Amino acid sequence: MNLEKFISNRVREVKPSGIRKFFNMVAEVPDVISLSIGQPDFVTPLHIREACIEALDRGMTGYTHNLGIIELRRGISHFLHKKYKADYDPTKEILVTVGGSEALDLSFRTLVSEGDEVLIPDPAFVSYEPLTILAGGKPVFVPTYEEDNFVIKPENIEKKITERTKVLVLNYPNNPTGAIMTRGQLEAIAEVVKKYNLFVISDEMYSELTYGRKHESFASIPGMKERTILTNGFSKAYSMTGWRLGYIAAPAEIIENMIKIHQYSIACAPSMCQYAAVEAINNGDADIEEMVKEYDKRRKFIYEGLLEIGLDCFEPLGAFYIFPSIKKTGLTSEEFSIRLLNQEKVAVVPGSVFGEHGEGYIRISYAASMDAMEEALRRMKRFLDSL
Ligand code: PLP
């Protein structure tokens, strides 16, 4: 039976993820060194795991408030104030979600109406385009360039503005490039946002993972809080990807509307995980510091290693990705990644899965052991020599 006519138009319009296709290919090759996955390689710190066990022992196994438990919302509010001078009322401006992924889905579905245009940096995290389409909107890509340190430029945003432009997506620290933005650069974007009356989805999932320079939140730029949905979560900062916990900080009116979706589709984030997150957000700064120190060591190692084997590379200052250029090999990023996988059993992600302007690059995750990276560099050198 042909089921296609039963599938909704919007779902049909979404292309299968390029990253999924590549992961399936990697799964079929045994003994691969994988530098492809966007997941910390640390186990969640013990005191956070214990907080979950304690919550279970206390029988905290029921539904929670739709917005999340108030202790967690207070913790998030305190954290955003302490770190980024972004002030949110925990009773009505913070919503706990199932991962950063639900936070993004709610953001697009709450803001986007049929035909609204959403500006998305290119290259970018793979979810923004399909979430825009599923919400009925039209993705419009704003290129970012290595020569600008992969930072989105106000003039490039302006070139893409039309009467239907409604939302601008920002993602700094950036997946896949590792770029971060200075306060001055964010202020320049804020001018464009005001001028064209836009709303911003600022995905700050990697806010805690920066090296040498602190993250600046777009919501803390004067006048931007009322025009911004800030999304973040516990997955990367506290190495809690499997707990599925994220959050949104936004004006109360936005949260009230988001709740209409969240209460029917999710009800609430898992209760025992929320108690673990209270411990993480209140007492997890030292864990972050330790993990950042380790990532920074690996970052320097892989950056210098890639230059040494002859791949030009922008120095990333955030997240745990590096995005070297493979243009001089003459291969497309997909050809490069598939051949490297088959010839040397090293998995990286083709830059093209992150957008047209990711072509000519590969994404390497350095959330991997030093030993794995050392061996991967050796194999990559052999691969480059064979071309
Ligand atoms: N935003 C960015 C930029 C990401 O890289 C990811 C995950 O890779 C997410 C959001 C989703 O995070 P979560 O695993 O908490 O759903």
Image: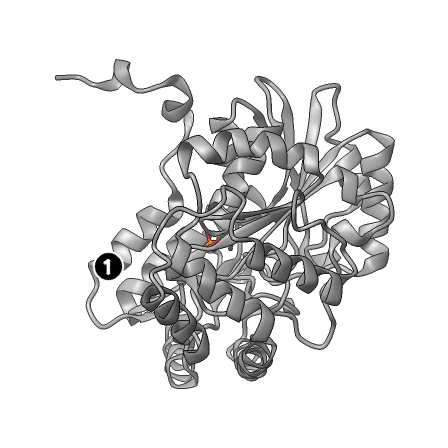
The answer to whether 128 appears left or right of 350 in the picture is: right
**Could one spot residue 336 in this view of the protein?**
no
Q: Kindly identify the residue that appears in the image at 36 percent across and 37 percent down.
A: 16
Q: Is residue 267 above or below residue 235?
A: above
Q: Residue furthest front?
A: 58
Q: Nearer the viewer, residue 308 or 205?
A: 205
Left or right of 77 in this view: 137: left
The single residue placed furthest to the left in the displayed view is 1
Rate crowding at label 1 as few (under 14), some (14 to 19) or many (20 or more) other CA atoms within 10 Å.
Answer: few
Q: Quadrant of residue 149?
A: bottom right
Q: Nearer the viewer, residue 11 or 159?
A: 11
Q: Is residue 111 above or below residue 211?
A: above
Residue that badge 1 annotates: 27
Residue occupying image coordinates x 75% and y 51%: 218
Q: Amino acid at mark 1?
A: Ala
What's the residue at 44%, 44% (across, down)? 268
Q: Residue furthest top?
A: 5
Q: Position of residue 277 (x, y in %)?
A: 49, 64
Q: Residue 232, percent across and down?
A: 58, 54
Q: Which quarter of the image is occupied by the N terminus?
A: top left
Query: Helix or strand or loop: what does disc 1 sit on?
Result: helix
Please state the horizontal and vertical placement of residue 372, each as a whole percent of the image: 37, 80
**Relative to 271, is 30 on the left or the right?**
left
Residue 283 location in percent, x, y? 57, 75
Q: Residue at x 69, y 32 (%)?
A: 253
Rendered image quadrant of residue 207: bottom right
In the image, residue 280 sits, relative to residue 230, either above or below, namely: below
Q: Quadrant of the C terminus?
A: bottom left
